[in-house]
């Protein structure tokens, strides 16, 4: 549900910046609205989202983040794919794949794959998990938590597990004529991970997290 | 250029600036980091347009060797073949996988070229204060930010195949130099798109800092 955000013409005298909010997309000033749970406010000019208030955001996001961390670890340990041709069979995990690239002098490609599908997603999930965990269980808020949450936001476009999965499917099609390729359990757990990551972006309410983090200061 | 309606005030015109990370407002002249999240707050991102151009030029330069050099080498007992981005698409379509061929075509050729054009258009319109609708610019910027990552598909395809298909003398796939150039091209165009400050599109004076 969307509610319209009115802008009044008395902004010039109003300097209490807590009552105001500027649109991140076009810098237009609006009055901050008291949203009901589940509502969000859009900019009246460029219709970017200004404010959100998502239900049970800390609980739900934390649950998803923990599930994602577990799935990521599972995906790293279990066999990802197996290949057979002319009686030779090879089974690899994600880490094996990176290791194979590293060993056969394709370090740059190996590192990039490792970074985009393992290290950056793991870093993002750990930062999110740490911040949400401390909020959820009413631990003392630390000064580094805003920094951690900021980086979790910044890393978002660089975690590319979803694109990797499309790449894997394309590879399956590409070599289906050359060899017999089968996907393992790690493939499926990575697939669920991708779905849950999308869900995290839907359910995580940054405004709520910032207001929790703000209370401490 | 659309003149803003009566009663619409930008944060900058009201003497305020908002944090790009968390949205908290502070006085325009206040040099301190954001009180809520600690990020450096700028009314408009510093040197936004310069960064866009710099990253874009590197991205476009890297895209040339990416298309000329082979991205994948296949060694088997029946001989060695090498594939460039385009020949990879053609061979996929030839072998009947039209859908997958089209995915790779869009990810590796369609999206990068569309992105170059859109970023050039947006950057030129800011640079020379062209009369482009703010809504159009805003939407185009959103699109480039969203689709940029998807160009990486081909990089992962080559990585998966090269890691998996190492059957010694029977069949081995090796990545070619082109894939490194292509990955760099994608990363730099992503950085270029991220460097835009969307608020610049809406400034009536198109103030470029």
Image (tube, coloured by chain):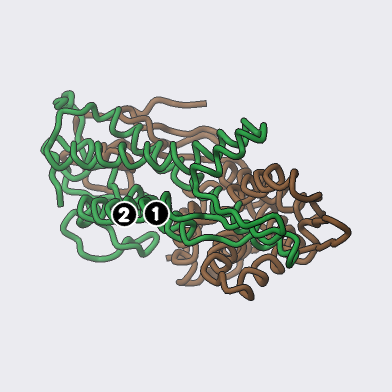
Chain colours: A brown, B green
Residue A203: quarter of image: top right
Q: Which residue sits at x=15%, y=52%?
A: B209
- Dot 2 crowding, Cα within 10 Å, few <14, some 14–19, many 20+: some
- Residue A189: x percent and y percent? 76, 53
* Residue position marked by numbered label 1 in the rendering: B185
* Residue position marked by numbered label 2 in the rendering: B61
- Dot 1 crowding, Cα within 10 Å, few <14, some 14–19, many 20+: many
Chain hosting mark 2: B
Report the side of B107 relative to B130 (left or right).
right
Q: A27 and B14: which one is in front?
A: A27
Q: CA distance from mark 1 to mark 2?
A: 8 Å
Q: Do we see residue A216 in this rendering?
A: yes
> Image height check: is A123 above or below B131?
below
- Residue A7: x percent and y percent? 28, 29
Q: Which residue sits at x=44%, y=54%?
A: B182
Q: B119 and A8: which one is in front?
A: B119
- Residue B64: x percent and y percent? 35, 51
Report the side of B143 relative to B164 (left or right).
left
Mark 2 secondary-structure assignment? helix
């Amino acid at each position: 549900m969307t509610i319209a955000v009115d802008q009044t013409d008395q902004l010039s005298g109003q300097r209490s910046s807590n009552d105001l909010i500027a649109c991140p997309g076009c810098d237009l000033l609006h009055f901050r609205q008291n949203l009901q749970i589940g509502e969000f406010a859009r900019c009246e000019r460029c219709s970017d989202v200004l404010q959100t208030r998502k239900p049970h955001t800390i609980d739900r996001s934390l649950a998803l983040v923990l599930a994602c961390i577990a799935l990521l670890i599972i995906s790293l340990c279990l066999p990802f794919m197996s290949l057979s041709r002319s009686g030779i069979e090879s089974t690899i995990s994600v880490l094996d794949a990176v290791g194979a690239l590293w060993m056969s002098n394709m370090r740059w490609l190996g590192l990039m794959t490792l970074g985009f599908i393992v290290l950056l997603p793991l870093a993002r999930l750990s930062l999110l998990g740490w911040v949400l965990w401390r909020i959820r269980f009413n631990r003392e808020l630390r000064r580094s938590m805003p920094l951690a949450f900021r980086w979790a936001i910044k890393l978002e476009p660089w975690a590319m597990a979803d694109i990797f999965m499309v790449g894997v499917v394309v590879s399956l099609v590409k070599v289906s004529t050359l060899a017999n390729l089968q996907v393992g359990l790690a493939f499926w757990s990575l697939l669920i991970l991708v779905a849950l990551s999308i869900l995290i972006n839907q359910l995580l309410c940054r405004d709520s997290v910032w207001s929790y983090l703000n209370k401490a200061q | 250029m659309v003149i803003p309606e009566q009663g619409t005030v930008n944060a900058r015109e009201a003497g305020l600036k908002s944090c790009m990370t968390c949205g908290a407002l502070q006085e325009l002249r206040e040099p301190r980091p954001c009180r809520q999240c600690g990020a450096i707050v700028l009314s408009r991102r510093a040197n936004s347009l310069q960064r866009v151009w710099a990253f874009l030029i590197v991205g476009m330069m890297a895209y040339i060797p990416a298309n000329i050099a082979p991205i994948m080498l296949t060694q088997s007992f029946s001989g060695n073949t090498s594939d460039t981005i385009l020949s990879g698409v053609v061979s996929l379509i030839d072998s009947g996988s039209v859908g997958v061929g089209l995915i790779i075509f869009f990810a590796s050729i369609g999206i990068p070229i569309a992105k170059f054009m859109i970023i050039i258009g947006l950057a030129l319109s800011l640079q020379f204060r062209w009369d482009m609708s703010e809504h159009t610019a805003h939407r185009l910027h959103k699109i480039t930010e969203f689709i940029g990552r998807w160009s990486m598909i081909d990089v992962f395809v080559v990585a998966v195949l090269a890691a998996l298909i190492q059957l010694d003398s029977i069949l081995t796939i090796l990545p070619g130099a082109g894939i490194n150039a292509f990955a760099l091209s994608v990363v730099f165009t992503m950085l270029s798109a991220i460097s835009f400050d969307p608020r610049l599109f809406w400034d009536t004076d198109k103030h470029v800092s």
